[in-house]
Image (cartoon, grey):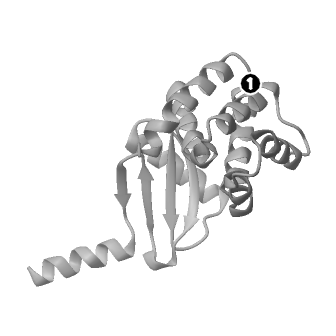
Amino acid sequence: MAELATIARPYAEALFQVASKGDLVQTSEQLDALAAVAADPQVRGFADNPKVTREQVFDLINFLFKSGLSDSSKNFLRAVIDNRRLSVLTEIAAQFHALVNARSGVSDATVYSAFPIDASQLNELVEALEKRFARKLNATVLIEPELIGGVRVVVGDEVLDTSVRARLAQMKLALTA
């Protein structure tokens, strides 16, 4: 079977082209919500049932959105369901976000921290990281107590690890070499 990224790419690019003419933020938010719904095991089980029609799957997902979906999001959802690609929706969302970020010159950064970071500390950290990585960053913080202290930052395929755990591993390597 083809890789999920290969399957998702044309959908993400088509949605990006349509959304570029309209509201990228709204499309992005709705796509995230659709991906979350599609990832739900009960929804996936319902959608994978051979006795359930595509229209029933669409009606269920559309019903779950109380605020309603835009016309372009509904059309996109219909295309995904008609082609039985609901399982790829999370990857489509990830690739769509990458296209939006590339257009705006922003990169996603995941900051792993041993402890919660307050807003002012995060702003200072993001400023320093933007200088280090030479681009604007959209930071998401995840708590990872195993780091002991410090942070580990992942931007695309680049990793900056200043955690205590990483320093201890370096010391262990130096001492045993």
Q: Is residue 15 above or below residue 82?
A: above
Q: Quadrant of residue 85?
A: top right
Q: Which residue is rendered at x = 73% and y = 40% of the image?
A: 29
Rendering quarter of residue 46: bottom right
Q: Mark 1 belongs to which amino acid?
A: Asp
Q: Residue furthest right?
A: 66
Left or right, 139 with respect to 58, comes to left
Q: Secondary structure at mark 1?
A: loop
Question: Is 64 on the left-hand or right-hand side of 105?
Answer: right
Query: Disc 1 designates what residue?
Result: 23
- Where is residue 27 shown, x and y percent of the image? 72, 32
Which residue occupies 48% across, 37% down? 7
**So how many labels did they put on this image?**
1
Place of residue 104 in the rendered image (x, y in percent of width and height, measured from the top left): 55, 27
Residue at (56, 50) in percent of width and height = 139
Toward the viewer: 132 or 42? 42
Residue 158 percent across, percent down from the top left = 35, 49
Return the residue found at the far left: 177
